Amino acid sequence: MIVFDWLIANIGTILVGLAVLAVVVFIIALKVRDKKKGKSSCGCGCESCAMAGKCHSATPDRK
């Protein structure tokens, strides 16, 4: 019953840890999905960026 007592004593920490883990996994999944769709990671257009020619030079043109 030592494990059960430890679980009861730390249930708040465990739940908060699981919630944080779920948020992190959700954010990573969104970033992977956006990357597969070819979206920029900065969230804005590249036309006004000074590094626009360097940032996405390796990616093929998508029309």
Image (spheres, rainbow, N blue to C red):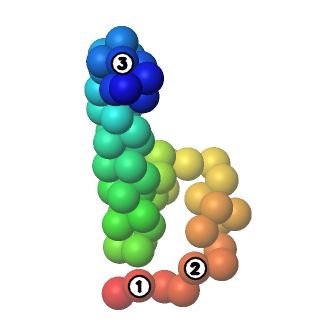
- Which of label 3 and label 2 is nearer to you? 3
Circle nearer the N terminus (3, 1): 3
Mark 3 = which residue? 5
Q: Nearer the viewer, residue 52 or 5?
A: 5
- Which of label 3 and label 1 is nearer to you? 3
Q: Is residue 46 left or right of residue 22?
A: right
Mark 2 = which residue? 59
Q: Nearer the viewer, residue 8 or 42?
A: 8
Q: Amino acid at mark 1?
A: Arg
- Dot 1 lies on which element? loop
Can you see residue 49? yes
Tags 2 and 1 in contact by the CB under 8 Å rule?
yes
Q: Is residue 24 left or right of residue 48?
A: left
Q: Amino acid at mark 2?
A: Thr
Mark 1 = which residue? 62
Answer few, some or many: residues within 10 Å of disc 3's Cα (few below 14, many 20 plus, some between 14 and 19): few
Above or below 40: residue 56: below
Position in image of residue 39 (x %, y %): 39, 64
Distance, label 3 to label 1, CA atoms, is: 57 Å
